[in-house]
Image (cartoon, rainbow, N blue to C red):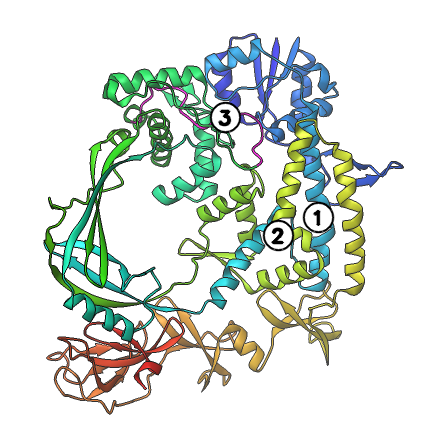
Amino acid sequence: MNLIIVESPAKAKTIKNFLGKEYEVIASKGHIRDLPKARFGITIDEKNHLIPTYSVAKENMPTVKQIKDLAKKSDIIYIATDEDREGEAIGWHIAHAIDKNPEELPRIVFHEITKTAINNALLNARKIDMNMVNAQQARRLLDRVVGYKLSPLLSSKIQKGLSAGRVQSSTLKLVVDREREIRAFVPQEYWSIDTLFKKDIEATLISHKGEKLSKLSIENKTTADAITASVKNDTFIISNIETKERRSATPPPFMTSTLQQVASSKLGFTPKKTMMVAQVLYEGVKTPNGTSGVITYMRTDSLNLAAEAVDAVRGVIESRFGKKYLPLEPKIYTKKAKGAQEAHEAIRPTMLDFTPEIASSFLKADEIKLYRLIYERFMSCQMNDAIFEQQSILFNGKENEYRASGRKLIFDGFYALTGAEDKDKLLPTLKEGENAVVQSIKPEQHFTEPPARYSEAALIKKLESEGIGRPSTYAPTIATLSSRTYVTIEKKQIVPTDMAFTVTEMLEKNFSEIVDVSFTANMEEKLDEVAEGQNDWQKLLSDFYFPFDEKVKEGKENIVSLKVTKPLGRPCPKCGEELLLRSGRFGEFIACSAYPKCKYTEQVEGEKSENSSGEASGEVCEKCGKEMVLKSGRNGQFLACSGYPDCKNTKSISVEAKISLTPCPECGGEISLKNSRRGPFWGCAGYPKCKFISKFEPTTMRCKESGCDGVLVQRTYRGKEVFECLKCKTRTLVEDMK
């Protein structure tokens, strides 16, 4: 009997289906040997080498015993863990755990779990690659050093339960830096001159009086009005018509990062969900020919494709779409992610006859969605480009110049499979030298927007471009930041918490290399060099460990604690020990100094407690006498007792009776402040005959725009005070009206 050891039970089951009775397949269920959980687990020898102390966790001992028992009965033991560094190291650990020499056990790897791939792997066994193992060991020890040394320091100086990590902390800094940009952002006013030429030709103003215009060139209403007047008085001719061909290139096949990004934008999957579904597709699902893996390995930063797979898909493209959709030569994609690891394959389907149409009868809803994405991406990457006819028209006047652009799809190429994302924008047939007439013109006010917060997909793209982490770390890193309450996910945007700023600021000041993007990326490159046999892993560890350890020791002495631990001078009602004022994740609280023996806590009375749980309202709870605080819920703001959870009294907010001095702009009636589940608003007393409502109180001023006489309201927009017309929505800075 021969034994094959893999990582996943699902993978073991699939492989077992392909092989005869002479093979037994068992799963290690991931790591079975690792650094200890309860202690550092690293010692320093006389050569200043970092020596890991690995052990088998208690919960993994039954698995190890099972593998040992099967190994004793086996003629050959194959290590068949995943094909990346992590898998190589797991295989090395398995060998040690079952008391075998890793260098004597045959190592087999495969990009896909199909019968052909497994049989080929068995015929081409190799030895465990110790360079890859040492690269993984170096990463594991680096992460242990940073986490084990820095996390307790953060807990002692800021708050209990905090953590830091080599990749985690530099990723958090990216999120915090983006939020700093947003908070520091000052909106800038700019105007566009929205113009149509007959017949319905949208055109962009590109120059005025010989001066080229950019998006932000027109800074205020005065300039916009002057240019508008100039255009109205100008006469235009068609000075140039240019037609050229533009190609829309086929997208490359998926690698881990791009699969996560596209699955997020098109399917709404989180990176974690994408990897979970992809893992199932890789390890084995039901097909018409039995259980099999239907995609290649999903943790990869390679764009390589197997020649036989490309040949096969070219045949499918020709038979399904015809020769004109097939390039003369196969397309080769060589651009890799910064610091890409092993030369794996890109993510592709393993069986082209298992089409999405057939697969829909075998796969679950989420599985078929992701499988279709992968299948169509692989096919489209080997099809011909789509071709557009691009047309550009210049309208020249005495003082102004416009450009209009149009396009027409003349060959759909890979769009025949995926559908066209670029819609035709056809221009009418025109001739150079003809007169052009302005059909309509309208100046429009805008304000620049702050940079957007990262979505999970956008953050992964940033990590990839900066060389931080590797395909296997993207999703877990974001999940860790979320679980540690460093970030929250709101409307698919990653928002850092106050604690994220506190931790990042302390690390920036005292451990700048840990949060430095270039330092983290450089370390990844050094780990790549270890995997390629070009760098010594122990030297890499020593060069980092000793300076870092010295900084941690200095930090323990010199970093000022941000913790609040103030004796209150009164005894604990439960045990009699002194009560302390402490700071926690949700603000300040009172706790017994005898913790953890005594776990008595209470809320802080007064302003701090109220502000941490809600804004002080000045109202008193009629049930217990404590102050009511303002809170926000699903139906808007409400009042809640500050004595919660002892007192659970709540009530809706009563809006103070307030009458506007300005009459209703629609019927002349009285306007008063009213309340709703969405908050207060100004409404006409003539309701329901008059349905006037406004979020902001109207002024006595009227809009001066041509053809508009709407009422203006004063409000804050993008951090600036503006007057906004309730009718045409034109905004004018308050300072410009003075």
Residue drawn at 53 percent across, 56 percent down: 175
Find disc 2 in the rendering and name its residue: 169
Residue 280 left/right relative to 678: right
Residue 611 drawn at (x, y percent): 53, 77
- As helix, strand or loop, the secondary structure at mark 2 comes to helix
Q: Which label sits on residue 10?
A: 3
The C terminus is located in which quarter?
bottom left
**Mark earlier in primary sequence (3, 1):** 3
Q: Which label sits on residue 312?
A: none
Find disc 1 in the rendering and name its residue: 146
Disc 1 and disc 2: Cα gap in Å?
A: 10 Å
Residue drawn at 67 percent across, 64 percent down: 158
* Quadrant in which residue 352 is drawn: top left
Residue bounds of the magenta highlight: 339-356
Residue 280 drawn at (x, y percent): 45, 30
The reply to whether discs 1 and 2 touch (Cβ–Cβ < 8 Å) is: yes
Would residue 146 be visible to someone looking at this image?
yes
Residue type at numbered disc 3: Ala
Residue type at numbered disc 1: Val
